[in-house]
Image: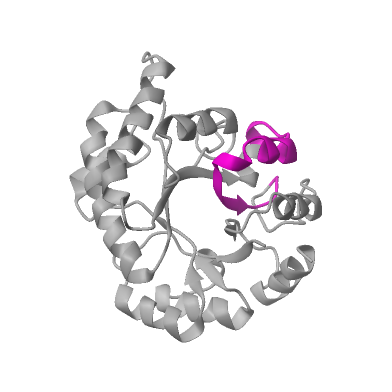
Amino acid sequence: MFTLSCSGGWVPGGFAEKIRAAAALGYRAIEPLCWLGEDLPAARAAILETGCTISAILIQSADATTAQLINNSHGIVHEDACKAFCRALGETIAAAQVLGCRNIVVTSGNERPGVPRSVQHANIVAALRAALPLLAGTGLRLVLEPLNVLVDHQGYYLTTTAEGAEIIREVASPQVLLLYDVYHQQITEGNLINNMQTYAAEIGHFHVGDVPGRKEPGTGEINYKNIFKAIAELGFEGFVVFECGLTEPVEVVTQKMFALVQ
């Protein structure tokens, strides 16, 4: 069975405070993503104290030039981002190892006008393959996230589940998988359950939120009772993360979410 992970934005404080707050709500995981500037040893202590883990962190770098090359205004659709991507990954792996966190979220960057998509696609594959020696023996995984361009991320390159899965197959490593965000994919393409089933072998992580508004499941048009049932029926044993906002107090929403997955 999958593990529900609390949104890092649902509770206040630094990593350690968030972990303790999520545990008090009954979660076994939380996903605050951005680790730079956090007290990682304190967060690790909170994880050991509570048994509530961090489901994923975002690839980041403390070096401004490196960070600029890998963010979505540039990204691994560019050939010159590959080395920066590996530098940032080295920093992020070190953080993940302190935290005992298994998943690292990566993005493609924005589409390059005038450059064939085949070239940009190949650059993403090349960067992910270049990361494999860094991942070897760590037990860590990269999860590559398609995003929607209609509402939230105008200009972003990777939008469809099909192309994301194709990239994962080309990289051909169990340490590089797809992050399937139900909110983004409902906006981009719909056909949610069929796509989850079709690309189950490539999916390593889930984000959830409802449409419209990106609030908690049950506030919009997506039938999340069936979505959670479908994820369970895939035999998925990773994390399903509430990557969304709230319409009610977190304590109320949490009880509704636990009921929704029963």
Left or right of 259 on screen, residue 162:
left
How many dots with numbers?
A: 0
Screen quadrant of the C terminus: bottom right
- Residue 108 sits in which quadrant? top left
The span picked out in magenta is: 186-212
In this picture, residue 169 sits left or right of residue 35: right
Which quadrant of the structure image shows residue 114? top left
Q: Is residue 40 above or below residue 206?
A: below
Q: Nearer the viewer, residue 232 or 54?
A: 232
Q: Is the image coloured rainbow, by chain, by secondary structure, or in one colour?
A: one colour
Residue at horizontal 66 percent and vertical 56 percent from the top? 215
Residue 86 visible from this viewpoint: yes
Residue furthest to the bottom in view is: 49
Q: Is residue 14 visible?
A: no
Kindly indicate the quadrant of the structure image that contains residue 151. top right
Q: Is residue 65 magenta?
A: no
Residue 49 picture location, percent across and down: 45, 86
Q: Which residue is nearer to you in this view: 207 or 140?
A: 140
Q: Is residue 202 magenta?
A: yes
Query: Which residue is drawn at the image coordinates 41% and 78% (left, top)?
Result: 16
Q: Quadrant of the N terminus?
A: bottom right
| Vertical placement of residue 46 versus 137, above or below | below
- Percent coordinates x, y for residue 40 in the rendering: 32, 73
What residue is rendered at 49% in x and 63% in y?
Answer: 55
Name which residue lies at 57% across and 73% down.
28
* Residue 125 percent location from the top left of the image: 37, 30
Q: Nearer the viewer, residue 255 or 134?
A: 134
Q: Nearer the viewer, residue 147 or 150?
A: 147
Q: Is residue 82 left or right of residue 251?
A: left
